[in-house]
Image (cartoon, rainbow, N blue to C red):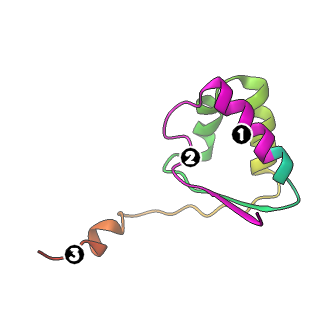
């Protein structure tokens, strides 16, 4: 698939089996396909939540280097989109 979107990335620590699968997926896509990561947490918190340092280093290296980062600030837009009763 040309585009993979990972929404709510790293809301909780990543389990060992999922960590290995994530590395495989990110490694296969690196420099070949587009990946969008959406997270409520800053990038500097991801390494800790990915877990095992060597695998976290490999994942972060592939995700961060050569990426475009858009940091949003302000209130959630969900309250503006909520329907009136």
- Please tell me which of labels 1 and 2 falls first in the chain: 2
Residue 16 colored magenta? Answer: yes
Left/right of residue 20 with respect to residue 66 in the rendered view: left
Find disc 2 in the rendering and name its residue: 9
Find disc 3 in the rendering and name its residue: 83
| Residue 80, image x, y percentages | 28, 74
Region rendered in magenta: 1-26
| Residue 54, image x, y percentages | 79, 25
Residue 9 colored magenta? Answer: yes
Residue at 75 percent of width and 49 percent of height:
63
Residue at 27 percent of width and 67 percent of height:
79
Q: Say which quarter of the image contains residue 74.
A: bottom left
Crowd rating for badge 2 (residues with CA inside 10 Å; few <14, some 14–19, many 20+):
some
Crowd rating for badge 3 (residues with CA inside 10 Å; few <14, some 14–19, many 20+):
few
Cβ atoms at labels 1 and 3 below 8 Å apart: no
Cβ atoms at labels 3 and 2 below 8 Å apart: no
- Please tell me which of labels 1 and 3 falls first in the chain: 1
SS category of the residue bearing label 2: loop
- Please tell me which of labels 3 and 2 falls first in the chain: 2
Q: Quadrant location of the N terminus?
A: bottom right
Left/right of residue 17 with respect to residue 39 in the rendered view: right
User: Which one is nearer the viewer's eye here, 67 or 10?
Assistant: 10
Above or below, comparing residue 44 to residue 83 in the picture: above
Find disc 1 in the rendering and name its residue: 22
SS category of the residue bearing label 3: loop
* Whole-number angstrom distance, CA of label 1 to CA of label 3: 37 Å
Residue at 21 percent of width and 75 percent of height:
83
Above or below, comparing residue 75 to residue 56 in the picture: below
């Amino acid at each position: 698939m040309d585009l993979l979107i990972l929404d709510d990335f790293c809301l909780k620590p990543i389990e060992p089996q999922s960590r290995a699968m994530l590395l495989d997926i990110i490694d296969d896509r690196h420099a070949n396909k587009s990946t969008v990561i959406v997270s409520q947490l800053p990038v500097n918190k991801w390494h800790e939540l990915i877990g095992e340092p060597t695998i976290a280093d490999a994942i972060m290296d592939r995700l961060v280097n050569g990426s475009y980062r858009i940091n949003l600030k302000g209130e959630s837009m969900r309250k503006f989109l909520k329907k009136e009763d």
